[in-house]
Amino acid sequence: MPEVAVVGGGVMGASIAYHLAAAGVDDVVLHERGAIGSGPTSRSTAVVRLHYSQPLVVRMAAHGLRVFASFRETVGAVSGFTRTGLLVAAPESERAALERNVAVGRGEGATTELLPAGALVEIEPRLAAEGLAFAFEPEAGYCDPYLVTAGFAEAARRAGVRIEEGSPVKSLSALDAGIVVVAAGPWTPALLAQVGYELPVRAAPTEIGRYRLPGGFGSLPPTVADFSARQLYFVPKPDGVLEVGTLDPEHAERTVDPDECPEGASRETLAAFGDALVSLLPAAAGGHWRGSWSAVYDVTPDWHPAIGHVAEGVIVAAGFSGHGFKLAPAVGAAVAELVRDGRSTSYDLGLLDPGRFARGDLVATTYGYSVLG
């Protein structure tokens, strides 16, 4: 009987398996229904940033940033980490909220600032800045989600973890393990229901478009998250492409079967993204879409994950609500401590206790509940 069975081979499950082995847990098996990194992780924009409302989550994201920036040295693989910087925009009327998040980040050691008037032009002069306040985080960037997940998985395998691909878990009891860690994203609630636990997670679709900037645009802009009426974010990628998505939480009001997620974004969505993008970045006019995809978020009521014990011998790490990638190294370390020691000593996980939903004790956020956390 394995000591620990991990269910889910996305970036969370792979990180957890790696950290369990690194913590000295001897007999670990990871079950992945398809191939490693083939689920929602494969459709992540993999943004790495520290702009959060809660100090705990800032600390967890900061650990992720350090790990991804030194992935070859720490894990023995390539993460594809690319530093772009991050601009967070909000209406001037919400400057105080933006300032509050900057203060939270700085209090946890993040390099971030609220930009004074006129400073934006030194970072990205092509943005339509009228009526907006901006925060800047120069160390933010993105990773290659597959390289990170495969890197964690291969390092775990080298350390003795058994990785079973093409191994869908239908029944937790059939795993016959001392401890089961469920990190199965939107498939998690159905598995936890087998042990009598109701995790309030919705499988919510989201859409992302790849926008080719026009010739002559110049250097790529930083990553931008705009909380004005546009509710838009974009991430610069190679070959003059922006990956564009929404910050509007309303998309999570409709749910999908995670096994039947649409492949691409709708024409209506891309048209709306295009209008919002050109409104924010007028120099992008004249570009065109070069593809799109849809993904599934596992969304909790407060858009923050559930990490902790939910039944005897069962731990959950799910509900990351579209912003979990950057947290994966910290989650792996914390769950390994939960397994080995019964509690996490690196992070006080009380804020993310799965029981908070039943108590009505939701995590507070600055911008309301959305993918920015």
Image (cartoon, rainbow, N blue to C red):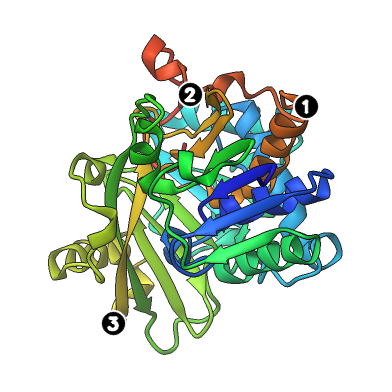
State which mark lies toward you, 1 or 2. Answer: 1
State which mark lies toward you, 3 or 1. Answer: 1
Instruction: Say if 70 sits above or below 327 in the image.
Output: below
Circle 1 sits on which residue? 341
| Helix, strand or loop under label 1 | helix
Q: Position of residue 91 (x, y in %)?
A: 37, 38
State which mark lies toward you, 3 or 2. Answer: 2
Residue at the image point whose x is 43% and y is 38% from the top: 319
Circle 2 sits on which residue? 354
The amino acid pointed to by label 1 is Asp
The mark nearer the N terminus, 3 or 2, is 3
Residue at the image point whose x is 72% and y is 72% from the top: 78
Res 286 quadrant in image:
bottom left
Q: Residues within 10 Å of mark 1 (few under 14, many from 20)?
A: few
| Quadrant in which the N terminus is drawn | top right
The amino acid pointed to by label 3 is Gly
Q: CA distance from mark 1 to mark 2?
A: 19 Å
Residue 249 relative to residue 25: left or right:
left
Circle 3 sits on which residue? 286
The mark nearer the N terminus, 1 or 2, is 1
The answer to whether residue 362 is seen in the rendering is: yes
